[in-house]
Amino acid sequence: MSPVREPVPNDLIFATDLVRSLRASGVVVHSVRHSIWNGFFNATQKAAWIETDLGIVDVVFFPTKADAQGIRITPADNAAEGRFHYMVQEKPSSAAKLVDASRPLYFTINETQFLVTESRELDKVVKEL
């Protein structure tokens, strides 16, 4: 893919600052789209899928730091061979939801953002933002 600087779609404008930060860190951002994580959490309906030269990162944007910081991720050991299960709990009083993946996932909670990627290299970058 060519490193075209595609604009962030208007309905995902909340992802603009993260896209700028990724680019400032030397990451080439190819595109920004809607994420399957939109609607996963009760506290927000803002999520973006960002394709980069290092892989894809999904990011959920929360209204407050407390909303994001309350999230708990626990690896589950009952996954079938070749699958990776994680239990994601929005807050202590909520039920945990199962996330089933075909590859290991890397999670980051950064201020008001919850980020998920399959790329170890991209995970290192988002943890430093």
Image (spheres, rainbow, N blue to C red):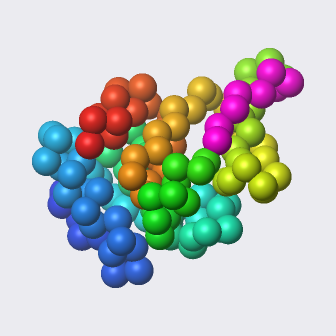
Q: 35 left or right of 40? A: left
Q: Residue at x 39, y 52 (%)?
A: 111
Q: Residue furthest top?
A: 81
Q: Residue at x 36, y 71 (%)?
A: 14
Residue 3: x and y in percent read 19, 50
Q: Quadrant of residue 56?
A: top left
Quarter of the rendering occupied by the C terminus? top left
Foreground residue among 89 and 30:
89
Q: Residue furthest bottom?
A: 10
Residue 35: x and y in percent read 53, 61
- Can residue 46 be seen at all in this image of the molecule? yes
Foreground residue among 77 and 7:
77
Residue 20: x and y in percent read 20, 57
- Can residue 1 be seen at all in this image of the molecule? no
Q: Is residue 64 above or below residue 125?
A: below
The residue stretch that appears in magenta: 72-79
Q: Residue at x 60, y 58 (%)?
A: 37
Query: Residue 75 lies in magenta, yes or no?
Result: yes
Residue 97: x and y in percent read 78, 49
| Overall secondary structure of the magenta section | strand
Q: Residue at x 33, y 75 (%)?
A: 13
Foreground residue among 43 and 40:
43
For the image, the number of numbered tags is 0
Q: 23 left or right of 71? A: left
